[in-house]
Image: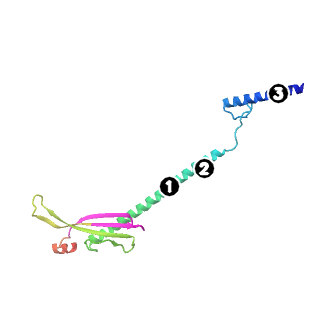
Amino acid sequence: MQTRRLKQVNALRPVCHWLCQWSNRCTGKAIGTPPFREQTSRNGLTLLEIVLAIGIFLAATSGILRLTSIGAKASTNARLQSEALMRCESRLAEILAGRAAAKTTDESVFVDDAGWSWQVRVERHSTRIAGDADSIISDYLKTISVTVRRRNSLDEVIALSTLSRIAGCSSGTTAEQYAGGLR
């Protein structure tokens, strides 16, 4: 009797197997999973999840490093621009105080740092009364422009500052003395 029953079970096994596969396709379960066995909770991570997490981590890290690099360049640029402005103000103050001649010069380097250079341009101005082309009120005004540059190893300007002031002669200065300073 048992052998007959075993033969019947064995005869129905392919049909049962086909039905299990068909029902698993419909329910979304993996093929070969018996329908009566429920999936238990998993205890680990899959390889796909680990690779995805590493990819997200690397993308975030590279973004943070790029932002750090941009911040460092901006900081260096701001420091160089500040130094250029201070050097420009210093040179212009020396000229206005009379420690340096108020005359146009070629580009010269600073004594304390050869990476920085400066240039002075002086222009005379004549002020006229509106409507009267022959009357000159003042021939004592001049525009003093100081330009400071910093060049890198490729001779590119990486910091530049220009200050201009309109200055007049001090009281008691004659026109000849003033004109002598402009040459």
The residue depicted at 85 percent of the width and 27 percent of the height is 7
Q: List x then y, in percent, for residue 18.
A: 73, 29
Verify CB contact (< 8 Å) between mark 2 and mark 1.
no
Q: List x then y, in percent, for residue 24.
A: 69, 31
| Amino acid type assigned to the residue bearing label 1 in the image | Arg
Q: Secondary structure at mark 2?
A: helix
58 vs 150, left or right, is right
Which quarter of the rendered picture does the C terminus lie within? bottom left
Q: What numbered label is drawn on residue 54? A: 2
Whole-number angstrom distance, CA of label 2 to CA of label 1? 18 Å
* Residue 139 found in image quarter: bottom left
The residue at which mark 3 appears reads as: 9
The residue depicted at 71 percent of the width and 31 percent of the height is 21
15 vs 148, left or right, is right
Query: Mark 1: few, some, or many residues within 10 Å (few <14, many ≥20)?
Result: few
* Residue 120 found in image quarter: bottom left
Query: Mark 2: few, some, or many residues within 10 Å (few <14, many ≥20)?
Result: few
* Sequence-wise first label, 3 or 1: 3
Whole-number angstrom distance, CA of label 3 to CA of label 1? 68 Å
| Amino acid type assigned to the residue bearing label 2 in the image | Ile
| Vertical comparison of 57 with 121: above or below | above
Which residues fall within the magenta stretch?
Answer: 145-169
The residue at which mark 1 appears reads as: 66
> Magenta span: helix, strand or loop, mainly?
strand
Residue 120 on the magenta segment: no
